[in-house]
Image: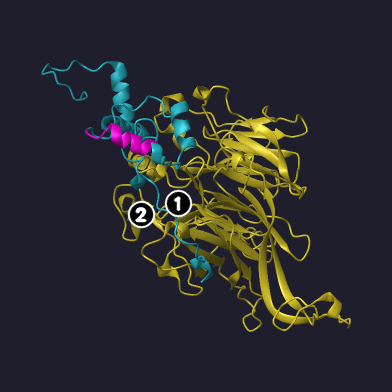
Amino acid sequence: VRGSSMSAEVPEAASAEEQKEMEDKVTSPEKAEEAKLKARYPHLGQKPGGSDFLRKRLQKGQKYFDSGDYNMAKAKMKNKQLPTAAPDKTEVTGDHIPTPQDLPQRKPSLVASKLAG
Amino acid sequence: MAGPGGGGCPAGGHDLQWCFSQVKGAVDEDVAEADIISTVEFSYSGDLLATGDKGGRVVIFQREQENKSRPHARGEYNVYSTFQSHEPEFDYLKSLEIEEKINKIRWLPQQNAAHFLLSTNGRFCFKLRGQDKTIKLWKISERDKRAEGYNLKDEDGRLRDPFRITALRVPILKPMDLMVEASPRRIFANAHTYHINSISVNSDHETYLSADDLRINLWHLEITDRSFNIVDIKPVNMEELTEVITAAEFHPLQCNVFVYSSSKGTIRLCDMRSSALCDRHSKFFEEPEDPSSRSFFSEIISSISDVKFSHSGRYMMTRDYLSVKVWDLNMESRPVETHQVHEYLRSKLCSLYENDCIFDKFECCWSGSDSAIMTGSYNNFFRMFDRNTRRDVTLEASRENSKPRACLKPRKVCAGGKRRKDEMSVDSLDFNKKILHTAWHPAENVIAVAATNNLYIFQDKVN
C-alpha cells in the first residue's frame, strides 16, 4: 500500500525499489521505527547527525534568563502571542524568550544526602 | 566466579548466584532531583565506595571488618564520610545556572593513611569570574587523636597575652572518637568550555586527564592553574561539527596511552609520546556498518556512552545504546565480542527518541579478573555477561528483593509473541527506572548498583 495520498487515482504498481523499501520496513524494526518517526515529524531533517543536532547537544540543559530581554520582549509583544517552543525539542534561544517558568527551580538550601541517613 | 580472590572463573563452570546485601537511600515515592545518584566508584582496594549525586554531594561508604561470629559473611558498607563537593552557583554575569551534579569521581591509589579522590561537576565556569571549581581533589583523612593541654587560651577561649604565659606546657595527644574529615586540597583551574564527561587518573599517579565534548586536557595533580590540551576536535567553523567526544580513559598500565570515544561510535587510541597534541590517533577502532541497514537512528544509537579498559590493559569495552562491545587493542577493524543489552528496544526507537531516553548514557564495568562485564538497563534491570561461559543474566535492583542474603532471581523480557508467566513485556517496562551507574569491586564479587536515588549492594552467594 502506498503512503497516504490525496489523489483518488489508482496507485501504480510499486517499482522494484519501492518494493525493497517496503520489505525493509517489514523486516527491519529500526526502519519501521524510522518510518513512524517521519510520519509524526515530517519536517525532521534527513540526518540526525550534523552540526545542528550536535550544537543542541552541546547546549543541552543550559537555560538562561535575561530580565532585560524578557521585559523588552514583553513590552514589544504586548498584543502578540509569544512564540512557544515545542517541549524539549528546540533550543532555548532565538525566537523563544525564556520565561521564569521555563527555568529549573532555584535550588533549595543545602541538605545532607539521604544515602548517609 | 566463586573461590578465593573472587572475580574469577566460575568454579566448575557454575554460574554465579547474586544475593542482596544492602540498600542505601530513602524509600520516597517522590524523588528529588538532587538525590539522584550520578556516579559510583570503588576505591583501588575496594574498602571504600564513593557516590556522587545531582545535588553535588559525595557520600563515601567504608567496608566494615568482617564479623568474627559470622566468618563467611562479607563486611558491610557503612557511611564513612559525606560532604558537599560542588555547590550550586548562579553566574550573574551570564545569567547561567552552574550545575553542581557530580559527573565523575575517581579515586587515587592510596599512598598514605589518607584517601584522595577527584570529583568533577559537568558545568563550565568562566575565566571572567576568576573562580574555577570544576575539578576538585579531596583529601579524606581520619582523626582519632586530639591534642589537649594547651595553655595558650583562657578557659573562655580567648587567647592569653603571651607575656602572661610563664610555664611551658607540652600538649598531650588523647584519643577521641573517630572523625573523618574531607577537605579540598586542590581546585583545578577550569580549562573546559563544555560539559566534562570524563576524568581519568594516569598509572603514573601524578597526572590525570579531563575530557569534555570537544577537548581533552592533561593535568598534574600538584598544579592547579595550568593544564595541557592534548586533544582538540573543535572545528574552526562550528557548522562543520560532526562528532563529539563522549568518554576518555588512560590505559591502566601504559602511562602514555589513552583512548577516547565519539558520538559516531568510534574509538581513538592516542600515544602521548608521538606528539604533544594528540589530534592524530595511533589507532582507530570502528566496526564496519552495513549501509543498507542505516536508519535515522543509526548514528544516535551507535554513540558510545562509556569506554573502560580491562584491568589487564589488553582489552577495552564500549557501551552504546543497545549493546556492549569488547575490543582487542590489537585489532581495530571490529570488536571481538558484542553483547546485546536490550535488543528488544530496537522496535521502540521512535518512542525512545521522543521521550529522550535514546540519549541516556549507560556506563559499563569489568569484574576484577575481567572475566565478566556488567551494565545497566531500564526497569531497574542490570545485565551481566560472563565472557568465559558466554552466559548472560538479567537481574533487578528492587526493594522487593531486599531480604538479607536473598538470592536474586533472573528476570526476562519478552520481545514479542507469547509471553510466559514470569516474563515482562517490553511495554510494561518502566523507562524512568534507569540503571546508568554500576561498579564492581576490584577483587571480589561485590557490586554496587545505583537505581535513581538508591544504592544497592549485591554479593555472590557465600557457601
Which residue occupies the foreground of this view, B402 or B315?
B402
Residue B306 location (% of width, % of height): 56, 44
Residue B181 location (% of width, % of height): 67, 67
Q: Can residue B15 be seen here?
A: no
According to the colouring, which chain is cyan? A
In the rendered view, tell whether residue A24 sits above or below residue B139: above
In the rendered view, tell whether residue A45 sits above or below residue B418: above
Give the side of residue B3 with respect to residue B438, left or right: right
Q: Main secondary structure of the magenta part?
A: helix
Give the side of residue B8 with respect to residue B448, left or right: right
- Classify 10 Å Cα crowding around label 1: few (below 14), some (14-19), many (20 and above): many
SS under mark 2: loop
State which quadrant residue B140 falls in. Answer: bottom right
SS under mark 1: loop
According to the colouring, which chain is yellow? B
Residue placed under numbered mark 1 in the picture? B377
Residue numbers of the magenta segment:
A69-79
**Picture residue at 52% right of the left edge, 22% below the top:** B240
- Label 2 vs label 1: CA separation? 10 Å
Kindly identify which chain the residue marked by label 1 belongs to.
Answer: B
Which residue occupies the foreground of this view, B60 or B185?
B185
Residue lying at the far left in this picture: please name it.
A8
Residue placed under numbered mark 2 in the picture? B430
